[in-house]
Image (cartoon, rainbow, N blue to C red):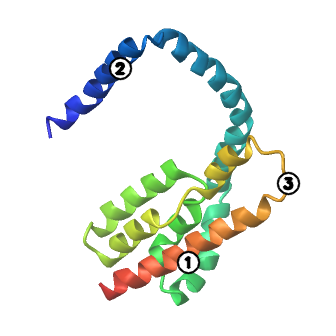
Amino acid sequence: MKYFSLLLPLLFLLLFVFAAIKRVKLYDCFTEGVKGAVPLVLSLFPYLAVILMLSELFEQSGLSAVLTKALSPVFSFLGIPPEISKLVLLKPFSGSGSTALLSEILKTYGADSYISRCACACYGSSETVFYISAIYYAGVEKKGRALPIFIALLSGFAGTIAACLLCRIV
């Protein structure tokens, strides 16, 4: 394990040696890269701010609790434990929020319980769709963003159902 901690400094050292051999001015190349990154960050900021605000609003407004309660019977029918329905709803919006929720589930039910295994599998089988979409579509001018987002949400939900089924079988 201690050898892995040397990997990153070793890679940087090799990069510096390679650049010196090729006579590349590293500092100039680095500043050029940063110049290109600043407009990208500025174009991403509004999209990320909206997604972060909406995910917090979703939780604080109580809409998350209402949807969780309303969809629990449907999730139960599909094989998703009702205890993780809030995680299933929050994951497409917030990675950090769903991580905190997963941690809470693990503390409440224990790491080896069916509910916790199911929650971990669901967490791993889905993505923060709206966050990724905000980053991806920040630089795209083309309209028609709803269909790919819908497909990503649907496939994430299908992955959640499959994950819970596998947890039940195993």
Earlier sequence position, callout 2 versus callout 3 = 2
Image point (73%, 42%), residue name = 138
Quarter of the image where the C terminus is located = bottom left
Sequence-earlier tag: 3 or 1: 3
Crowd around label 3: few <14 · some 14–19 · many ≥20 (10 Å): few
Measure how far apart labels 3 and 1 are at the Cα level. Answer: 26 Å
Residue in front for this viewpoint, 78 or 41: 41
Can you identify the residue that label 1 sits on?
158
Left or right position of 43 against 1: right
Considering depth in this image, is 133 or 19 the residue closer to the camera? 19
Task: Give above or below for 27 relative to 83.
Answer: above
Q: Which mark is residue 18?
A: 2
Task: Please tell me how crowded label 1 is: few (under 14), some (14-19), or many (20+) other residues with Cα within 10 Å.
Answer: some
Q: Earlier in the sequence, mark 2 or mark 1?
A: 2
Q: Residue at x 57, y 85 (%)?
A: 73
For the question of whether residue 66 can be seen, the reply is no
In this picture, is 11 found above or below 56?
above
- Quick check: marks 2 and 3 in contact, CB under 8 Å? no
Q: Nearer the viewer, residue 125 or 30?
A: 30
- Residue 143 tag number: 3
The local secondary structure at tag 3 comes to loop
Q: Position of residue 136 (x, y in %)?
A: 67, 47
The residue mark sitting in front, 2 or 3, is 2
Q: Amino acid at mark 1?
A: Ala
